[in-house]
Amino acid sequence: MNGPGMTTALGRRRLLSGAAGGVLTAGLCLPRFAAAADGVTFGSITPNTGTYGFAGKLVTNGSQLAIEMAGGSILGRPIRYISRDDEGRSATGVRRLSDAISDDGLSVFNGNYASDIGLAESAIARRQKVLQYAAGGSEDFTGARCSRYTFQWSANPYTAMKTVMDYVAQTHPDARRWYTITADYIFGQALLKYARVVGEGKGYSFIGNAAHPLGERQYTQYLTQAVAARPDVICLLNAGSDAVTCLRQLAGFGAKDTLVVAPWSIEVDQLPEIPDAMRAGLILGENYVSTLDTPANREFVAAYRRKYGTAPGYSAAYGYDSFRTVLLAMERAGTTGIASVITTLEGMQYDSVLGPTSIDRATHQTVRPYFVIRGRADSAAGAAGDYAELVATGSDPQPHALNACRDIGAL
């Protein structure tokens, strides 16, 4: 049952446009025994504060839309939706997830935007036998800490770095001296690892790296070192508000002749925050762009615009497509039972918002494309705020020899 096929099948239960569709929100919590008897509970444990605070509401928007477009029910069971703020902290995320499982009967969740939080929650998912569809950029979700209960929607960091660096090699063949600025936690370290793996294969030299803590506000010391090294490329291996702050401060260093590449840093939603001088020519890697011409994406974008008045970005697309994928698997399995849903997801081929998509049976990595966009200044932007153009797509998977998932475990 591909792409629109899900809408057709699930649309049999679609309620009137604009209705709640049977979705019970976080404000209408029921005891666990009622949730278990009456329906299935989906939830988002996602940040509303901190470095990735901008993403929380967007993930929730996409997640709720997926449930509404399914008619608010699956296989005759109402879908209950809850959301919880992990506050950008692992301990909080683990506690909120544990409470949602014990108090609200949660069985499927997404929203794992920060890798360290998502990986901590994956241990809870495995122990409590609930399904996690993550989005953090660490390779460990489908590598060293892989689990039968965790799936990864975002691209593998190898795929991301390979796609972006292939584009740079093609368009800037003389840009061979790279300086990296890295968020010093598991996400940034994964990007740095694969920047070096891919770059060394192209004969690039990495002439320096500045590691900064998550949530850094002052980048002068890192940028001073980077500009002084006179690289051909300054490569940002951070994300969220860290990347925006770093770029805004870089604008004051006069590095006009230095190519700035951000392989997984700035989402389309954040581009208006970047000064014109830095946005023009900026090379960015993206997990999602709203202009993808696929049946499922056209339907998603149209529905999102109707509901929220704007085009979706990565955060909303992740929330939507991760839950849409689980609902597809439930339809195919003929049950909402998590063990059966997991075995159905393993190796599943389907049409997602990204186009033809599959899930690696051995690692639970979603096998999918990654995208490169090039920034425009305001003067080149369209009336709808089109601050970038799609310039390249790649889908090279992580080489098997580099994957550390040796035993994904049992159900």
Image (cartoon, grey):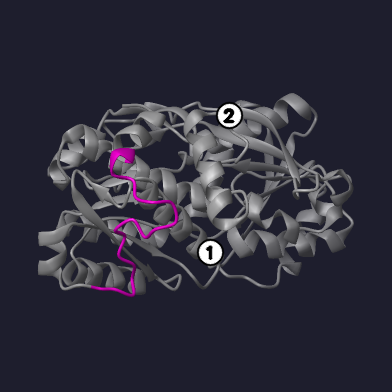
Q: Which residues are magenta?
A: 11-29
- Screen quadrant of the N terminus: top left
Q: Position of residue 20 (x, y in %)?
A: 36, 60
Q: Position of residue 110 (x, y in %)?
A: 36, 55
Q: On the picture, is 274 further left or further right than 145?
A: right
Circle nearer the viewer, 2 or 1: 2
Quickly name the residue at label 1. Answer: 52
Label 2 sits on what residue type?
Answer: Asp
- Residue 293 tag number: 2
- Counting residues from the start of the chain, the first of labels 2 and 1 encountered is 1
- Residue 335 tag number: none
Write the residue at 55% across / 37% down.
160
Residue 203 is covered by the magenta coloring: no
Write the residue at 53% across / 55% down.
307
Residue furthest to the front in view is 16
Write the residue at 79% across / 60% down.
250
225 relative to 233, above or below: below
Q: CA distance from mark 2 to mark 1?
A: 28 Å
Q: Quadrant of residue 232?
A: top right
Look at the numbered disc 2 and give the secondary structure of its residue. loop
